[in-house]
Image: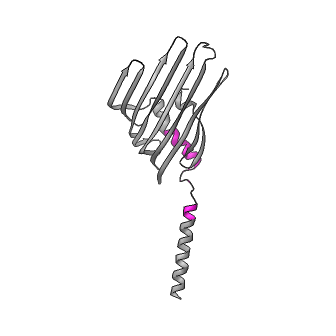
Amino acid sequence: MHRYIFIFLAVCFLVQCDSMEDNNMPLLTKSETDNLVYAFLEPIFQDDLVERQVHSRSENGSDITSDITFGCPDDGEVRVASSGLVQETDSTFSLAGSGTLIPQSCVSGEFVLTGNPSIEFTLGIYIDITDLEAPDAEIKGDFNGTLDWDYLDRSGTCQWELNLQSIFTSDNFEVYLRGQACGNDLDLDARHIFLDE
């Protein structure tokens, strides 16, 4: 009898383990993942962070490189290492850059974010200002990598595979972050992340 009980418990354990492996439900809902992405990126690209330590910074003509640790909005830090090439003419402006975002117990809202190891990014901006009433512009890029998060009573590791896409017309301006983050499919309005609206 005891043998059958043991077998029954073993089978239940295996079935439960299989169920847990197959059930790859994200620990964050889509709405919470949206908020995580906004909480991390918006302060960085809106210059809300406070400079704490400059590891390196240089400008060589149109080439710009920097490695700076900033204070996060509510606590902790994020290290931002980046390089870029700026080109300007009388009618155009362009920026092509790439870098690494490494949060270190970075607190933004209810999220605490730590690099695991980091989020890598590329960013390209092109603006044709020949017609100031309706400038031709394009923003593109991507964000890829992993970070650890704590949110309320939960924690986990979040992988990012997000592409930045833009649509510009004479009467319409849209910027989207699309892809996957934290196991959720995302399609985010990113205008206020990259532009001060």
Is 70 a magenta residue?
no
In the displayed structure image, the side of residue 137 where residue 44 appears, left or right: left
| Residue at the image point whose x is 45% and y is 46% from the top | 147
Q: Is residue 34 above or below residue 89?
A: below
Q: From this viewpoint, is residue 152 visible?
A: no
Residue 31 appears at what percent x and percent y?
Answer: 58, 45
Does residue 168 appear in the picture of this structure?
yes
Q: Is residue 24 part of the magenta span, yes or no? A: yes
Nearer to the camera, 133 or 164: 164
Viewer-nearest residue: 8 or 97: 97
Q: Estimate the x, y position of residue 66 in percent, counting from the top left.
A: 37, 28
Q: Main secondary structure of the magenta part?
A: helix
- Which quadrant is home to the C terminus? top right
The image quadrant of residue 79 is: top left
Classify residue 65 by image quadrant: top left
Q: Position of residue 29 (x, y in %)?
A: 57, 50
Please state the extent of the stretch shown in magenta in the rendering.
19-39
Q: In percent of the image, x 47 and y 50: which residue is there?
A: 157
Q: Is residue 157 above or below residue 137?
A: below
How many marks overall? 0
Indicate whether 195 appears above or below 115. above
